[in-house]
Image: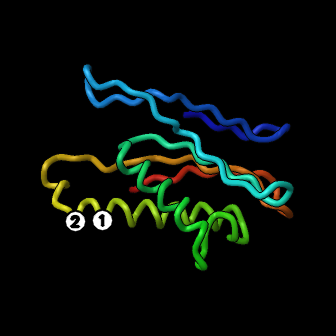
Amino acid sequence: CVAMRLRAGLLFASDTRTNAGVDHIASFRKMVQFQIPHQREIVILCAGNLATTQSVTSLLNQRLHGDGEHLLNVPSLYDAAVLLGRTLKEVVARDSDAGMQGQGVDFGANFLLGGQILGEGPRLFHIYPQ
């Protein structure tokens, strides 16, 4: 996955290949988009443990329908990045507590979050679990 901030705006590119070993190659969408036309555009690129990235993006999508803070109501793109980081931390803690950490499973995942919210310039963030 690649994201760049250019004078003309933001550029996002991602592949769809996943690799769980030589015999386990599949494809999965690694770019997710959240938008309210003319108000906000948020793009998230995912890399790392597929179970972690799927859990994080699923939770972010589920929470769009609740009353709490979510990607379509945060006041700034920085707050969107913080929300993504908290969700990543929640998923890694939950899955680590399930006993998989001791079996050598790496729950690590990296995210590139970028976009623009009305009233702000375009921004780009790298979110990682360390």
Q: Which mark is residue 97?
A: 2
Q: Hey, which residue is sitting farthest top in the picture?
A: 22
Q: x and y percent of residue 17 in the render?
A: 44, 27
Nearer the observer, 34 or 80 = 34
Q: Amino acid at mark 2?
A: Asp
Q: Position of residue 113 (x, y in %)?
A: 61, 50
Describe residue 91's horizontal placement relative to residue 99 as left or right: right
> Where is mark 1, residue-wise?
94
Quadrant location of the C terminus in the rendered image = bottom left
Secondary structure state at the residue bearing disc 2: helix
Above or below, comparing residue 69 to residue 15 in the picture: below
Nearer the observer, 130 or 100: 100
Percent across and percent down for residue 83 are 55, 66
The residue furthest bottom is 67
Q: Is residue 18 toward the left or the right of residue 33 in the image? A: left
Q: Position of residue 13 (x, y in %)?
A: 62, 31
Instruction: Please name the residue shown 46% across and 47% down the image.
Output: 110
